[in-house]
Amino acid sequence: MPAHGKHRRPRRHPVSRGLALVGTGGAALALPLIAPAAAGAAPVSGAPEISRPAVAPAAALAPAAAPKAPAAARTYTVVSGDSLSLIAQKKGIQGGWKGLYKANRSAVGDNPSLIHPGLELTLVRDSAKAAPTKAKAAPAKAKAAPATTKKAGTAERASRSERRAAAPAAVAAPAAAPVQAAPAAATQYANNLDGWIRESLDIMARHGIPGSYDGILRNVMRESSGNPLAINNWDSNAAKGTPSKGLLQVIQPTFDAYHVPGTSTDLYDPVANITAACNYAADRYGSIDNVNGAY
């Protein structure tokens, strides 16, 4: 039956039809499935392994707190007429004279009013005066930087707070602080009649003994002509064995009774002689100024 076999339509295998579908209309569906499989294939042996960089913690992105600038230390040498208050005002010391004294207590001692010329003081000027300006500029920089996380912003605010707390507020020198003058250096007196009288007057002033330069000079010139070793060996006192001696011709018992503490116990010492005689004249006549003759 060749004719029957010739007109018979050959039957295709189901597998062939399936392949045809895949090769035509099914390609759009098959390709996405093949592509991921190729992307996920194992790397070729020997190829370098690529690792993703680790993300830095948010806290690490926060700017570190600016280091506190060290205080600049300098020295100052005390001159005559200086006081801690004057130096503090002149040099702009934080805390005024109290701050200066605190920094130099070991050198000054227990009395802040007593500083001597030549003493070297350490001056510490707090550099934190500029801190407020720098702290104000910080927010502007923070605005320019991209925000990372909430945690980083919190860390930045905490950092600024710490810097503000670390920078002490500038303290102006107290306007009401009394200006204390440094004790004057010991007065030097000339070793002559003028110097002896002036030294005696200073001692008399400390002990409340009245008297003037002119009153002392007038009586000295009458009694001894300015000779501290003068002695009277002929008057009634000399006859009794107690001659008058020194610038103001004082006998020993009177000198002993009216001697002023702090002066020499030698009757011939010019300062001791003048001071004791003026003390006696104040007790007897009210003042050496009231003595115009032998006394």
Image (cartoon, rainbow, N blue to C red):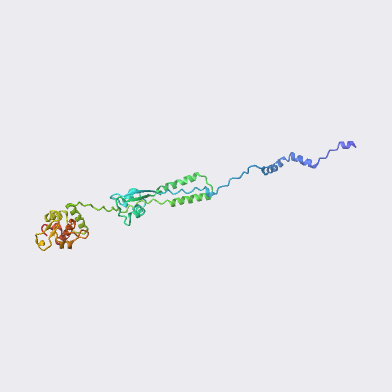
Quadrant position of the N terminus in the picture: top right
Question: What percent of the width, then of the height, locates residue 167?
Answer: 42, 51
Q: Can you see residue 30?
A: yes
**Picture coordinates of residue 184 (x, y %)?**
26, 52
Q: Position of residue 78 (x, y in %)?
A: 31, 50
Q: Nearer the viewer, residue 234 or 121?
A: 234
Q: Is residue 6 left or right of residue 119?
A: right
Q: Which residue is drawn at the image coordinates 21% and 57% (left, top)? A: 203
**Residue 286: quarter of image:** bottom left
Please report the residue visible at 89 percent of the width from the left and 36 percent of the height from the top.
Answer: 2
Q: Is residue 75 left or right of residue 4?
A: left
| Depth check, front residue: 280 or 158 | 280
Residue in front for this viewpoint, 292 or 15: 292
Observer-nearest of 159 and 136: 159
Q: Is residue 213 above or below residue 241?
A: above
- For residue 210, say whether it is visible: no
